[in-house]
Image (spheres, grey):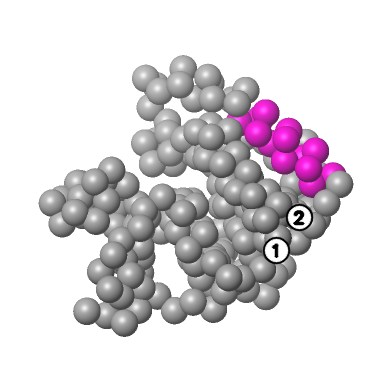
Amino acid sequence: MSDRIRIFGDSISGNCYKQKLACSELGVDYDWVETSVLDGSTHTPEFLAMNPNGKVPVMQLPDGRCLSESNAILSWLADGSELVGGDRYERANVLRWLFFEQYSHEPYIATSRFIVRYLGSPPERQADLEAKRPGGYKALDVMEEQLENDDWIANGGFSIADIALYAYTHVAGEGGFDLGKYPAVQQWIARLEARKGFLPMYSDGH
Protein backbone atom coordinates (compact mmCIF):
# COMPACT_ATOMS: atom_id res chain seq x y z
CA MET A 1 0.00 0.00 0.00
CA SER A 2 1.19 3.53 -0.86
CA ASP A 3 2.61 5.74 1.87
CA ARG A 4 0.90 8.74 0.25
CA ILE A 5 -2.73 9.72 0.33
CA ARG A 6 -4.73 9.00 -2.80
CA ILE A 7 -7.51 11.28 -3.98
CA PHE A 8 -10.12 9.97 -6.37
CA GLY A 9 -11.72 12.81 -8.27
CA ASP A 10 -12.99 14.36 -11.47
CA SER A 11 -10.66 17.14 -12.57
CA ILE A 12 -13.40 19.56 -13.67
CA SER A 13 -15.51 19.05 -10.54
CA GLY A 14 -15.32 21.98 -8.15
CA ASN A 15 -15.77 19.69 -5.16
CA CYS A 16 -12.72 17.71 -6.30
CA TYR A 17 -10.73 20.81 -7.23
CA LYS A 18 -10.98 21.96 -3.60
CA GLN A 19 -8.66 19.12 -2.61
CA LYS A 20 -6.06 19.99 -5.26
CA LEU A 21 -6.06 23.64 -4.22
CA ALA A 22 -5.80 22.79 -0.52
CA CYS A 23 -2.91 20.39 -1.13
CA SER A 24 -1.13 23.03 -3.18
CA GLU A 25 -1.60 25.64 -0.45
CA LEU A 26 -0.47 23.27 2.29
CA GLY A 27 2.35 21.52 0.43
CA VAL A 28 0.69 18.10 0.78
CA ASP A 29 1.91 15.33 -1.52
CA TYR A 30 -0.76 13.02 -2.94
CA ASP A 31 -1.59 10.71 -5.80
CA TRP A 32 -4.53 11.75 -7.98
CA VAL A 33 -6.79 9.06 -9.45
CA GLU A 34 -8.95 10.51 -12.22
CA THR A 35 -12.48 9.21 -11.74
CA SER A 36 -15.32 10.17 -14.06
CA VAL A 37 -18.75 10.93 -12.65
CA LEU A 38 -20.41 10.12 -15.98
CA ASP A 39 -19.07 6.71 -17.06
CA GLY A 40 -20.12 4.60 -14.09
CA SER A 41 -16.71 4.66 -12.40
CA THR A 42 -18.20 5.85 -9.12
CA HIS A 43 -20.67 2.97 -8.98
CA THR A 44 -18.35 -0.01 -9.29
CA PRO A 45 -18.17 -2.36 -6.30
CA GLU A 46 -14.60 -1.23 -5.67
CA PHE A 47 -15.53 2.45 -5.54
CA LEU A 48 -18.70 1.88 -3.50
CA ALA A 49 -16.58 0.05 -0.94
CA MET A 50 -14.74 3.36 -0.44
CA ASN A 51 -17.83 5.57 -0.59
CA PRO A 52 -21.26 3.92 -0.55
CA ASN A 53 -22.73 7.25 -1.71
CA GLY A 54 -21.03 6.76 -5.08
CA LYS A 55 -19.61 10.27 -5.37
CA VAL A 56 -16.23 11.95 -5.70
CA PRO A 57 -14.01 13.13 -4.16
CA VAL A 58 -12.79 10.30 -1.98
CA MET A 59 -9.51 10.43 -0.10
CA GLN A 60 -7.81 7.15 0.79
CA LEU A 61 -5.28 7.28 3.60
CA PRO A 62 -2.10 5.18 3.57
CA ASP A 63 -3.68 2.82 6.12
CA GLY A 64 -6.61 2.18 3.78
CA ARG A 65 -9.23 4.25 5.55
CA CYS A 66 -11.33 6.44 3.28
CA LEU A 67 -12.97 9.81 3.74
CA SER A 68 -15.61 11.32 1.47
CA GLU A 69 -17.41 14.68 1.29
CA SER A 70 -15.26 17.49 -0.07
CA ASN A 71 -15.36 19.77 2.95
CA ALA A 72 -14.65 16.94 5.38
CA ILE A 73 -11.55 16.14 3.33
CA LEU A 74 -10.59 19.84 3.39
CA SER A 75 -10.87 19.79 7.18
CA TRP A 76 -8.66 16.71 7.40
CA LEU A 77 -6.03 18.17 5.09
CA ALA A 78 -5.87 21.48 6.93
CA ASP A 79 -6.13 20.11 10.47
CA GLY A 80 -3.62 21.81 12.75
CA SER A 81 -2.92 24.63 10.28
CA GLU A 82 -4.06 28.25 10.31
CA LEU A 83 -6.46 27.44 7.48
CA VAL A 84 -9.01 25.98 9.92
CA GLY A 85 -9.07 28.96 12.30
CA GLY A 86 -7.45 29.62 15.64
CA ASP A 87 -9.65 29.50 18.72
CA ARG A 88 -12.91 27.64 19.20
CA TYR A 89 -15.04 30.44 17.76
CA GLU A 90 -12.87 30.86 14.67
CA ARG A 91 -12.93 27.14 13.93
CA ALA A 92 -16.71 27.12 14.23
CA ASN A 93 -16.93 30.19 12.00
CA VAL A 94 -14.94 28.42 9.28
CA LEU A 95 -17.33 25.47 9.61
CA ARG A 96 -20.27 27.86 9.32
CA TRP A 97 -19.08 28.93 5.88
CA LEU A 98 -18.38 25.33 4.85
CA PHE A 99 -21.97 24.46 5.72
CA PHE A 100 -23.18 27.56 3.85
CA GLU A 101 -21.22 26.47 0.79
CA GLN A 102 -22.80 23.03 0.73
CA TYR A 103 -26.35 24.05 1.63
CA SER A 104 -26.86 27.54 0.19
CA HIS A 105 -24.26 27.84 -2.58
CA GLU A 106 -23.35 24.48 -4.15
CA PRO A 107 -26.95 23.27 -4.76
CA TYR A 108 -27.58 26.26 -7.02
CA ILE A 109 -24.29 27.38 -8.54
CA ALA A 110 -22.55 24.02 -8.85
CA THR A 111 -25.61 22.14 -10.05
CA SER A 112 -26.32 24.84 -12.67
CA ARG A 113 -22.77 24.38 -13.95
CA PHE A 114 -23.30 20.61 -14.03
CA ILE A 115 -26.43 21.01 -16.16
CA VAL A 116 -24.64 23.33 -18.59
CA ARG A 117 -21.09 21.97 -18.70
CA TYR A 118 -21.56 18.25 -18.06
CA LEU A 119 -25.01 17.69 -19.57
CA GLY A 120 -24.87 20.27 -22.37
CA SER A 121 -27.85 22.31 -21.13
CA PRO A 122 -30.56 20.00 -22.54
CA PRO A 123 -34.01 21.51 -23.20
CA GLU A 124 -35.65 19.30 -20.60
CA ARG A 125 -33.43 20.80 -17.87
CA GLN A 126 -34.04 24.49 -18.65
CA ALA A 127 -36.81 24.81 -16.08
CA ASP A 128 -34.48 23.34 -13.43
CA LEU A 129 -31.75 25.75 -14.50
CA GLU A 130 -34.00 28.78 -14.20
CA ALA A 131 -35.30 27.60 -10.83
CA LYS A 132 -31.76 27.64 -9.46
CA ARG A 133 -31.07 31.26 -10.40
CA PRO A 134 -32.62 32.97 -7.33
CA GLY A 135 -30.85 30.69 -4.85
CA GLY A 136 -27.51 31.10 -6.59
CA TYR A 137 -27.74 34.86 -6.69
CA LYS A 138 -28.82 34.95 -3.05
CA ALA A 139 -25.64 33.05 -2.11
CA LEU A 140 -23.54 35.48 -4.15
CA ASP A 141 -25.31 38.38 -2.43
CA VAL A 142 -24.31 36.98 0.97
CA MET A 143 -20.71 36.58 -0.17
CA GLU A 144 -20.62 40.09 -1.61
CA GLU A 145 -21.82 41.58 1.67
CA GLN A 146 -19.19 39.62 3.60
CA LEU A 147 -16.38 40.53 1.23
CA GLU A 148 -17.26 44.23 1.14
CA ASN A 149 -16.04 44.34 4.72
CA ASP A 150 -13.23 41.79 4.71
CA ASP A 151 -10.59 40.46 2.33
CA TRP A 152 -11.42 36.85 3.18
CA ILE A 153 -14.53 34.85 4.00
CA ALA A 154 -13.93 33.99 7.66
CA ASN A 155 -12.05 35.50 10.59
CA GLY A 156 -10.10 38.06 8.58
CA GLY A 157 -7.65 35.55 7.11
CA PHE A 158 -7.39 33.02 4.30
CA SER A 159 -8.91 29.66 5.25
CA ILE A 160 -10.49 26.53 3.84
CA ALA A 161 -13.73 28.52 3.76
CA ASP A 162 -12.20 30.54 0.93
CA ILE A 163 -11.07 27.39 -0.87
CA ALA A 164 -14.51 25.80 -0.55
CA LEU A 165 -16.35 28.84 -1.87
CA TYR A 166 -13.84 29.74 -4.56
CA ALA A 167 -14.09 26.32 -6.21
CA TYR A 168 -17.50 26.93 -7.78
CA THR A 169 -17.74 30.71 -7.52
CA HIS A 170 -14.89 31.38 -9.93
CA VAL A 171 -16.60 29.24 -12.59
CA ALA A 172 -20.13 30.42 -11.80
CA GLY A 173 -20.30 31.89 -15.29
CA GLU A 174 -20.18 28.36 -16.70
CA GLY A 175 -23.57 27.83 -15.08
CA GLY A 176 -24.98 31.10 -16.34
CA PHE A 177 -24.36 33.35 -13.33
CA ASP A 178 -23.13 36.90 -13.98
CA LEU A 179 -20.42 37.99 -11.54
CA GLY A 180 -20.30 41.44 -13.07
CA LYS A 181 -22.43 42.96 -10.34
CA TYR A 182 -20.29 41.49 -7.57
CA PRO A 183 -17.12 43.63 -7.44
CA ALA A 184 -16.11 42.48 -3.96
CA VAL A 185 -16.40 38.83 -5.02
CA GLN A 186 -14.33 39.53 -8.13
CA GLN A 187 -11.63 41.24 -6.07
CA TRP A 188 -11.60 38.28 -3.68
CA ILE A 189 -11.16 35.89 -6.61
CA ALA A 190 -8.20 37.97 -7.82
CA ARG A 191 -6.63 37.95 -4.33
CA LEU A 192 -6.94 34.20 -4.05
CA GLU A 193 -5.52 33.63 -7.52
CA ALA A 194 -2.54 35.81 -6.63
CA ARG A 195 -1.56 33.61 -3.70
CA LYS A 196 1.75 31.77 -3.96
CA GLY A 197 0.07 28.41 -3.38
CA PHE A 198 -2.65 28.92 -5.98
CA LEU A 199 -3.29 26.13 -8.47
CA PRO A 200 -5.77 26.74 -11.32
CA MET A 201 -8.63 24.34 -11.97
CA TYR A 202 -7.76 24.05 -15.64
CA SER A 203 -4.23 23.36 -16.80
CA ASP A 204 -4.42 26.21 -19.34
CA GLY A 205 -5.62 28.60 -16.62
CA HIS A 206 -9.10 28.96 -18.10
- Pick the residue in front: 197 or 203: 197
* 102 displayed left or right of 53: right
Q: Residues within 10 Å of mark 1 (few under 14, many from 20)?
A: some
**Mark 1: amino acid:** Gly
Is 104 rendered above or below residue 40?
above
Q: Which residues are magenta?
A: 136-148
Residue nearer the viewer, 199 or 80 = 80
* SS at badge 2: loop
| Residue 137 coordinates in the image, percent (x, y) | 66, 30
Q: Is residue 21 left or right of residue 96?
A: left
Q: In the figure, residue 197 lies in which quadrant?
A: bottom right
Tell me the SS state at disc 1: loop
Instruction: Please report contact status of discs 1 and 2: CB closer than 8 Å, yes or no.
Output: yes
Q: Of all residues shown, which one is farthest toward the right?
A: 149
Please name the residue shown 64% across and 64% down the image: 83
Residue highlighted by disc 1: 86
> How far apart in space, not on screen, are marks 1 and 2 (Cα)?
9 Å
Residue 120 position in % (x across, y down)? 39, 35
**Around disc 2, counting alpha carbons within 10 Å, would you say few (fewer than 14), some (14 to 19), or many (20 or more)?**
some
Q: Residue at x 67, y 75 (%)?
A: 196
Could you say which disc has been placed on residue 155 in the image? 2
46 or 190: nearer the viewer: 46
- The quadrant of the picture occupied by the N terminus is bottom left
For the point 49% across and 52% down, the residue is 71
Q: Can you name the residue that lies furthest to the left here?
A: 45
Picture layout, residue 127 above or below residue 57 = above
Viewer can see residue 170: no
> What's the residue type where badge 2 is placed?
Asn
Report how many numbered discs are placed on residues in the image: 2
Looking at the rendering, in which quadrant would you find the C terminus? bottom right
